[in-house]
Amino acid sequence: MGALAVPRSADAVVVGGGCMGASTAFHLARQGLGVVLVEKGHVGSGATGHSGAIVRQHYESRVGIRLARDSLAFFSRFEEETGLPCDFRRTGFLSGSRERDLPAFEALLGLLRSEGVRAERVGSDEATEMEPRLDVSDYAALVHDPDAGYADPIATAVGFAEGAGRSGARVLEGRGVVEIVVRKGRVAGVKLRGGGSINSSRIVLAAGNWTPAIARRAGVRLPVRFVRGEVAILRCPPGFGAPPRIHFDFYGNTYSRPEAEKDVLVGYMDTDPRKAVRGPELRDDAIAAATVRDLRGRLARRFPIIARAQPRGGWSGLYDVTPDAYPILDAVGPEGLFVAVGFSGHGFKLCPEVGRLLAEYVASGRRPEALAALRESRYRERKPVVPDAPFPRRRRRLP
Ligand SMILES: Cc1cc2nc3c(=O)[nH]c(=O)nc-3n(C[C@H](O)[C@H](O)[C@H](O)COP(=O)(O)OP(=O)(O)OC[C@H]3O[C@@H](n4cnc5c(N)ncnc54)[C@H](O)[C@@H]3O)c2cc1C
């Protein structure tokens, strides 16, 4: 990758070298299209580089479960497919339900299983055997998904981009798209910052938080808000043993996963609406010490020894949030323009399948059935994605 001469034309231009753009470019190039992937910084420098990169299948809607399930299968064979590792580590996933939420919990378990997810129901004793430091005193039952894990988000984006390059795609880093050229209602190409342009009749906007502003200049309004997401890194106290597998605590509002051999990565399940920001640029990607303390305190309610864990920093990133917390994956505005935006803080795990489906759409011009629920018009039609099995009953925590 790196600085290359700008090609005059391409079968398709993909704007944005995050995990979504890189995956889409990879799948388009594999279909034999001449692709240029344009990234204003370096590949993986946006939300992807800030991601917690948890790869779980635990969704409340069929559309989410299917995208996550098929993406997880790809993560497991990533190196075979792209030629580079994404360091996917299978850790397993645990999450518990209190007595009052058991009916919703059972319904969700049924939904996951009906989609082929290995969602195992475990009792408190079994969970304590699996995770001896976990406080299960308020849990009536837990779900275990042995297949879940996490990957290296930057290696994933770079692996897709390099894999695209091996199939003939051009990857331009350090070149921002400033305008989508539209002629007679069709896209005709892109103009680049610093001069130069690429002619193309197919453009995929996968520029993350920057997508709405670029789309607006082409006459398309997208309902996306920007919300700060934060993760903290905690060093497990000596003697703690291996960091616990992925845990979603719906009651304490934390998710956590191992970070390498000795640390835990922890973040909030729910994004705080007060953390919305006005524009796509994150001026400061640091995390406040008070936030790290709050996250540690919450996690310590689930893993009491974590109260003694040493904070080792963390970071912030921006979520691109839609009204139903599901992405918009569709053709919009002028003919030939496609968008992949609005991943609402949970897109990383979906990028292999999103890229594959979008590439199919772009190459064939026919929307794959799997993307119908994620069409842009669903908000105007008042048909947003709704959970098929919401958990817990009273509060919606997961998309
Ligand atoms: C703190 C945090 C934790 C998260 N944890 C998880 C998790 O555990 N699991 C999970 O599944 N998801 C998680 N996510 C969400 C996930 O990281 C995102 O949904 C995903 O990375 C979005 O990828 P993207 O390619 O759409 O966007 P981005 O990664 O933002 O990529 C967009 C790219 O476009 C480029 N760009 C912008 N404008 C232009 C332009 N004009 N021209 C050219 N290039 C341009 C940017 O530089 C950027 O590289 C997390 C996100 C954050 C912030």
Image (cartoon, rainbow, N blue to C red):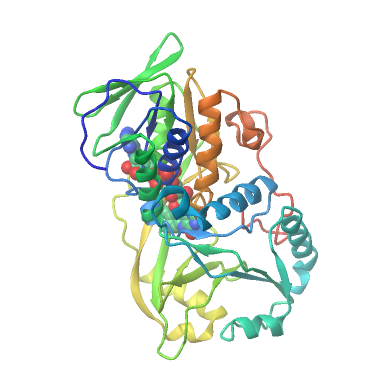
Would residue 317 be seen by someone viewing this image from the given angle?
A: no
Q: Is residue 243 above or below residue 217?
A: below
- Residue 39 lies, in percent from the top left, at 31, 38
Vertical arrangement, residue 157 with respect to residue 143, above or below: above
Using residue 112 as the reference point, say whether residue 351 is left or right of it: left
Is 132 above or below relative to 341?
below
296 or 272: nearer the viewer: 296
Q: Residue at (56%, 67%) from the top-left corner?
A: 253
| Residue 306 drawn at (x, y percent) | 47, 82
Q: Answer yes or no: is residue 148 visible.
A: yes
Instruction: Tell me where residue 162 sits by quadrant.
Output: top left
Please state which of residues 72 and 336 is positioned toward the viewer in this rendering: 72
Instruction: Give the side of residue 288 with respect to residue 305, left or right.
Output: left
Lateral position of residue 166 relative to residue 343, left or right: left
Q: What's the residue at 70%, 81% (across, down)?
A: 124
Quarter of the rendering containing residue 97: bottom right
Q: Quadrant of the N terminus?
A: top left
Q: Residue furthest bottom?
A: 239
- Is residue 144 toward the left or the right of residue 109 in the image? left
Tell which of 74 and 105 is nearer to you. 74
